[in-house]
Image: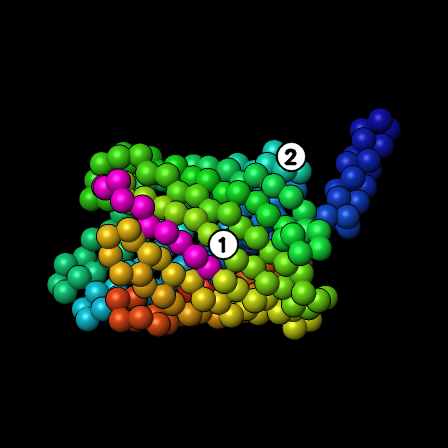
């Protein structure tokens, strides 16, 4: 009898949690990462597959890239990024795991008037935690501030500012993103976005992309996206699909 009552309480608790937890918010598929924190005590997995045409006779595949997140509390989440890549240059193909990144996301403030909802994201790549052909020379940090404004019930504006290092030199690459998200209905969402990378000692490259998301249920979402390079030194185009879920 006691076991039956305990089981009923557990089922009730799961049902209540599912009803009260906000629908899943993911950092994919756009380049603009969300300020939202994974709910306390929940794991979230964001997996993507992409094909990118760089320049003549050069392509890159992510098979897959994965972001693993855990909500420690309402203001803090732990993060782990893993990525298996296949790079092809002329007749040479290289594949393996990029350096693993570990990090966190910290909530700074909620949205209030003109002040956006804001969080800080920081990662550190581990140079030797990679396949032999992708190992870096140094530990490489990356960080960004991610901000979001609610413009209406259906429309939002998000943007990121930050920097990253490649693990081979001390020169940073500055990052910017700007995206508008539009909720077509309760299940279907869309976005358009501009983003770019500006190396300290090289010309910046700028890109445009767009995509859609479909909320299967409160804890599971699928996505499809594609983008093109705006400047000559940017990749020609890419296409990606993926999914995000939490437990």
Work out whether residue 205 or residue 182 is closer to the camera in this orientation and state it: 205
| Disc with the residue nearer the chain's start (1 vs 2) | 2
In the rendered structure, the answer to whether residue 221 lies left or right of residue 204 reads right
Which is closer to the viewer, label 1 or label 2? 1
Q: CA distance from mark 1 to mark 2?
A: 23 Å
For image coordinates 46% across by 52% down, the residue present is 161
> Against 161, is 193 above or below?
below
10 Å crowding of disc 2: few (<14), some (14-19), many (20+) = some
For image coordinates 18% across by 57% down, the residue present is 93
- From the image, tell me which residue sits under label 2: 73
Q: Quadrant of residue 100?
A: top left
The N terminus sits in image quarter? top right
Q: Residue at x 31, y 61 (%)?
A: 204
Give the residue at the far front of this rendering. Answer: 114
Query: Which residue is labeled 1 in the image?
Result: 160
- Determine whether, in the image, residue 199 is placed left or right of residue 35: left
Q: Which residues are magenta?
A: 168-177
Q: Most extreme residue toward the left, as rendered?
A: 91
For this orientation, the residue located farthest to the top is 2
- Where is residue 181 shown, x and y percent of the image? 59, 66
Q: Circle 1 — which element?
A: strand
Magenta span includes 21? no
Which quarter of the figure is the C terminus placed in?
top right
Q: Look at the image and tell me whether residue 69 can be seen.
A: no
Q: Residue at x 65, y 68 (%)?
A: 155
Q: CB atoms at circles 1 and 2 under 8 Å apart? A: no
- Rendered view: 136 above or below 33: above
Residue 97 locus on image (x, y percent): 30, 45
């Amino acid at each position: 009898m006691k076991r039956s009552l305990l089981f009923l309480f557990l089922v009730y608790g799961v049902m209540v949690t599912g009803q009260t937890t906000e629908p899943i918010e993911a950092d994919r598929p756009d380049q603009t990462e969300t300020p939202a924190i994974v709910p306390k005590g929940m794991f979230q997995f964001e997996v993507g597959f992409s094909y990118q045409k760089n320049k003549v006779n050069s392509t890159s595949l992510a098979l897959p890239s994965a972001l693993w997140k855990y909500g420690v509390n309402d203001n803090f989440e732990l993060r782990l990024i893993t990525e298996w890549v296949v790079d092809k240059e002329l007749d040479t193909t290289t594949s393996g795991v990029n350096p693993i990144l570990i990090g966190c996301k910290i909530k700074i403030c909620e949205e209030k008037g003109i002040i956006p909802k804001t969080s800080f994201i920081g990662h550190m790549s581990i140079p030797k935690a990679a396949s032999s052909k992708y190992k870096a020379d140094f530990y490489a940090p990356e960080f960004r501030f991610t901000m979001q404004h609610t413009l209406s019930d259906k429309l939002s504006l998000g943007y990121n500012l930050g920097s990253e290092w490649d693990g081979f030199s001390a020169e940073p690459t500055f990052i910017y993103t700007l995206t508008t998200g539009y909720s077509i209905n309760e299940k279907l969402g869309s976005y358009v976005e501009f983003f770019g990378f500006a190396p300290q000692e090289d010309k910046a490259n700028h890109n445009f992309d767009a995509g859609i998301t479909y909320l299967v249920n409160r804890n599971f979402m699928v996505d499809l996206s594609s983008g093109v390079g705006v400047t000559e030194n940017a990749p020609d185009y890419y296409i990606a699909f993926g999914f995000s879920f939490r437990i």
